[in-house]
Amino acid sequence: MPQNFYELVWIFIIYAFIGWCTEVSYAALDTGKFVNRGFLNGPYCPIYGCGVVIVVAILTPLKENLLILFAGSFLLTSVLEYITGYILEKVFHNKWWDYSDKPFNIKGYVCLKFSIYWGLACTFIMDIIHPIIYAAIRFIPFVLGVVLLSIIMCVFAADCIITVTTILKFNKRLKVMDEMAASIHRLSDEIGENIYENVTDVIEKSEKFQKTHVELMDKISETKENIYGLPQTAKDKLAETTGAAKDKLAETTGAAKDKFAETTGAAKDKLAETTGAAKNKLAEKAENYAASREEKKRERELALEEKKRERAELMERYEKLYEEKSFGFQRLMKAFPDMKSRDNNETLEKFKIHFNIKKKDENKKDQAS
């Protein structure tokens, strides 16, 4: 059992390195290639170091009872993995591993299968590996051990800072790209709506113009019929007057002829006046309609071109963000291929496709085929 903080730090560092080696070996067997599976850039997985430190510190007095040792390791490491996954997601807004597709999982942070692996591994470590590791730690001269630990922990701290900075930049890029994708989608919709409105407006204006034209023509025809009906009325009146007063035929006929001529002339003048006014009104409306339509068309074309230009700029910037140097981003996605972003998962999945990063299940399918 560790006697002081110095020994605990050594245990943390050594098992963090052993854990990294285990993860890399597992990934190599799983994908057929080397993948740095650590959360940090260096060759260590802090969760393994923390897990073994907790097990060693708490369960050393019970190491003689393998069943209790297994149960305690199973429980302690599962709690550690759950808390670690939960905190990482809350702090960085990313779910770094996800066991949701595994049976008997708890919110995707832990699952029965890997908890059993943890329990068996810690039992083996406590019974076989740790006595050797602990003897090696005690064999290292204290001063040399302090110097080595100081160097290692400084590198470890710098790695933590670099990794946290990388994650924050990555999340910022995901957010920016997600917002740009939403803007591109919105502009595309607006462009489509603008084109639809132009077509619809042209159809509506054409129908309205045709309707107005028909109404005016009907009005002109009606006026003509009314005017042409006036001479016949005059003739009927003339015949009636002639039958009633034959003795005044000459006088009445002369008066009727004068009245007929007067009525016919007035009717012709009214017809010409009404027809001219209707034509002028129709021409004026047609001219106003054409001018208004042309003005609105120019305004919409300018707005459409502006939106197309804005969309093209956004798409260019969007593609550039994919191509920018992002070694840290790629390393994190390769280390955690099942990672999910709580806020910008759609963009994260596009990043994975862009860099050809496949999930664990997809890698297994490719190997099987």
Image (cartoon, helix red, strand yellow):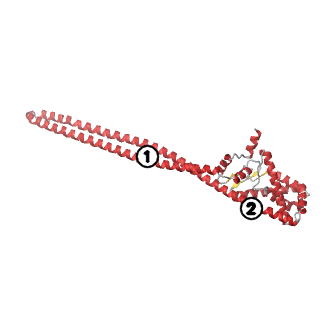
Which three-letter amino acid code belongs to the residue tagged 2?
Ala
The disc placed on residue 199 is none
**Quarter of image, res 54:** bottom right
2 or 1: tag closer to the N-terminus: 2
Circle 2 sits on which residue?
Answer: 158
Residue in the picture at 76% in, 43% down: 364
Residue in the picture at 91% in, 60% down: 135
Q: Residue furthest right?
A: 64
Number of numbered labels in the structure image: 2
The answer to whether residue 129 is left or right of residue 355 is: right
Crowding at mark 2 (Cα within 10 Å: few <14, some 14-19, many 20+):
few
Q: Nearer the viewer, mark 2 or mark 1?
A: 2
Residue 23 rendering spot, x and y as whole percentages: 80, 51
Q: Residue furthest left?
A: 247
**Quarter of image, res 159:** bottom right
Question: In terms of secondary structure, where does tag 1 sit?
Answer: helix
Residue 226, above or below 178: above
Which three-letter amino acid code belongs to the residue tagged 1?
Lys
Crowding at mark 1 (Cα within 10 Å: few <14, some 14-19, many 20+):
some
Circle 1 sits on which residue?
Answer: 297
Residue nearest the observer in this picture, 177 or 79: 177
